[in-house]
Amino acid sequence: MLMRPVLMLLWLLSAGAQAADYPRVVIDLAGRSVTLPHAPQRIVLQDSNDVLALALLERENPLRHLVAWDNNLASSDPGLWNVIQQRWPEARNVQTLAFPQSGQLDIESLLRTHPDLIIARLSARSAIENTVLESVLQRLGIALIYVDSELDPLVNVPRSIELLGRVLGREKQAQAYLDYYRRQLSSLQQHINGLEPPRVFVEARAGQAGGGGCCHTQGHSGWGLLSEHLGAINLGSHYMRSESGDVALETLILSKPDVYLMTGTQRMRNGVGAIPFGYAADNAKIRAEMERLMSRPGFNATAQSPGQCVQGLSHQFYNSVFNVVGAQWLAKIYWPDAFAGLDPDAEYRRLIQNFTTLPDLPFIFHEQVCFEELDTKAG
């Protein structure tokens, strides 16, 4: 009978210790100094994809303090959104708020959720600063912090996790994941050192982005920046000065990349699908879409030889707290002999098992299709 009072006392002591750690001052990824008067209790996510960061830090229930979000996850990665709903059914009940790129946010609706913390993407900073939101939040004492997993993925994901761990009082959980993340990335980079850098072209959201033709890519951003960090030669940044854009198929026919990589997602965009990688994916549909894209007029002339293969990879990995798995897939694709023993899918399962309570459900994140297979079918 003494156990219940003892447990209650321990809980009160723990809660008191955490409360004593506030107020605290943090520096967010925009370089802003932000004061948190108390542990956040009512959180708004400008981008619901950041619930994955909370899943690392608030493992049993990352939604317990969420009051609203812009639910981009539901459209950007429907398979993962279904997994989130399966694990935490209350996700369906989180209020949806639109944070449009134009910055035309309904501030009154936001304030009606009574938030004490807003977590926003660094990429949304200019849109937010074009409104009165930041001054309103300052006047009301509502904290706003910026995180990033998109603009500089391998650099800013660790910084964002460390920041959120400090903000939420979950430093122990943040450090455990960061230790793993840094070990994996360091091991990857050590094995890459001294290897010949391949010339790679990443067609981002192949067949869906840009004008829907060929060939949309990323320069010093996203998959392009990830590739460069690993030591590959990103042809996207060679042919473009912008963060993203289209490279003419004729240019790629002349350059003939060592590796042609298509990324894909289950997201529909203006009614146009892409290579449907992700949870509960259908391999036949993935291969059919890759074969369709490889059958675009003139595309086979990008190959250095008839035996060359095109690689496909889940687009979502570059913009994720789990991007170290995306980096592992890139290493395996770019240097297949050196990383023949690497199993990124197994690493992903190990990650979610050890650092989250997400269920281990079937997924497909990678596929390859060779031009010879298309020729055989055509024949």
Image (cartoon, rainbow, N blue to C red):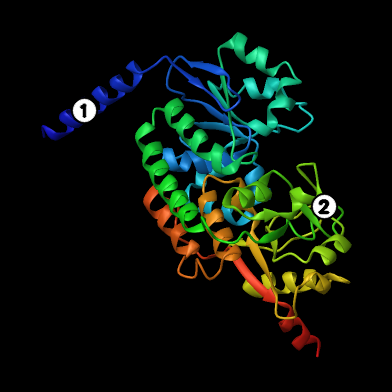
Residue type of the residue flagged with mark 2: Asn
Q: Is residue 168 above or below residue 353?
A: above
What is the quadrant of residue 39 in the picture? top left
Farthest top residue?
A: 139
- Please state the horizontal and vertical placement of residue 279, each as a whole percent of the image: 57, 61
Residue 50 makes an appearance in the image:
yes
Residue 198 disc label: none
| Residue at image coords 35%, 18% | 21
What is the quadrant of residue 214 in the picture? bottom right
Q: Secondary structure at mark 2?
A: loop
Farthest front residue?
A: 194
Nearest the camera: 167 or 299?
299
| Residue at image coords 66%, 65% | 312
Q: Is residue 357 left or right of residue 205?
A: left
- Image quarter of the N terminus: top left
- Please state the horizontal and vertical placement of residue 102, each as a whole percent of the image: 79, 30
Residue type of the residue flagged with mark 1: Leu
Gap in angstroms between the C-alphas marked 1 and 2: 54 Å
Quickly name the residue at label 1.
10
Nearest the camera: 350 or 191?
191
| Nearer-N-terminus badge (1/2) | 1
Q: Is residue 58 above or below residue 260?
A: above
| Residue at image coords 50%, 67% | 338
| Residue at image coords 40%, 48% | 183
Residue 60 makes an appearance in the image:
no
What is the quadrant of residue 172 in the picture? top left
Farthest left residue?
A: 2
Q: Is residue 120 left or right of residue 38?
A: right
Quickly name the residue at label 2.
270
